[in-house]
Amino acid sequence: MAPKDEITTLLHRFQEGDEDAQSQLVKMVQHELRVIAARYMRREKQGHTLQTTALVNEAYMKLVQMKGANWKDRAHFFAVAAQIMRRILVDHARKRIAGKRGGGFDLLPLDEGLVFSPQRSDELVRLDEAMTRLAEHDVRACKVIELRFFGGLSIEETAEVLNCSPRTVKREWTFARAWLREELGLPPESVTGV
């Protein structure tokens, strides 16, 4: 893993238009982007329609197109990357189920094993909709779920990105998981920590 300060410096140079910085940045962040993408794709059955590499490539293309982005640091960059990957997967899932009519939803296990697959498209869309409702009530709690669950950030990294204390992140993490459990009609044991 590249040093945090070096990635932050490259991000700032890239923002200023330094093309060499972009080239160096790609090499430094590629592994971490693959780790984030792999969290989404973990335990996936063979034959799913979106590969980890495609997810990383699409997310990176969207990241570099964000010319006006004001990257604070490495943690901010990877938090945005996680949000973009979530968006890509939800959009992909919505396209897959667009023609589907009727049918109920199964209970959604909200744990780090949630991955994308054609069979889980409904679950991912359902979780995304619940998170959108959570954001209407508590934006920071939604961000905590997004950064910890989807982005795989630690309590400390999440606190750094959100500019709050680790204790606040822990409190929001507990609240957000309980809120999602209630919203999705899940039993208490279905929501585990990252």
Image (spheres, rainbow, N blue to C red):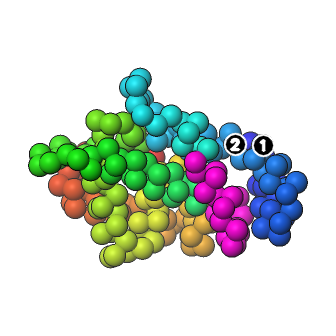
Say which residue label 1 marks.
27
Residue found 72% across the figure and 64% down from its top: 73
Residue found 54% across the figure and 43% down from its top: 55
Q: Give the crowd class for mark 2: few <14, some 14-19, many >=20 residues within 10 Å.
A: some
Residue found 78% across the figure and 51% down from its top: 25
Q: Is residue 109 left or right of residue 142?
A: left
Residue type at tag 2? Gln
| Circle on res. 5 | none
Q: Is residue 72 left or right of residue 35?
A: right
In the foreground, 104 or 161 = 104
* Residue 115 image offset from top left, x and y in percent: 40, 39
Give the SS element for disc 1. helix
Q: Examine the structure image and report whether residue 63 is included in the region drawn in magenta.
A: yes
* Residue 21 image offset from top left, x and y in percent: 85, 56
Q: Examine the structure image and report whether residue 56 is included in the region drawn in magenta.
A: no
Q: CA distance from mark 1 to mark 2?
A: 6 Å
In the foreground, 103 or 181 = 103
Residue type at tag 1? Lys
Q: Quadrant of residue 71?
A: bottom right
* Residue 181 image offset from top left, x and y in percent: 25, 56
Residue found 78% across the figure and 67% down from its top: 15
* Dot 1 and dot 2 residues touching (CB under 8 Å): yes
Q: Is residue 179 visible?
A: yes
Q: Give the crowd class for mark 1: few <14, some 14-19, many >=20 residues within 10 Å.
A: few
In the foreground, 41 or 168 = 41
Q: Quadrant of residue 177?
A: bottom left
Q: Quadrant of the N terminus?
A: top right
Say which residue label 2 marks.
30
Q: Is residue 1 left or right of residue 187?
A: right
Magenta region, residue range: 58-79
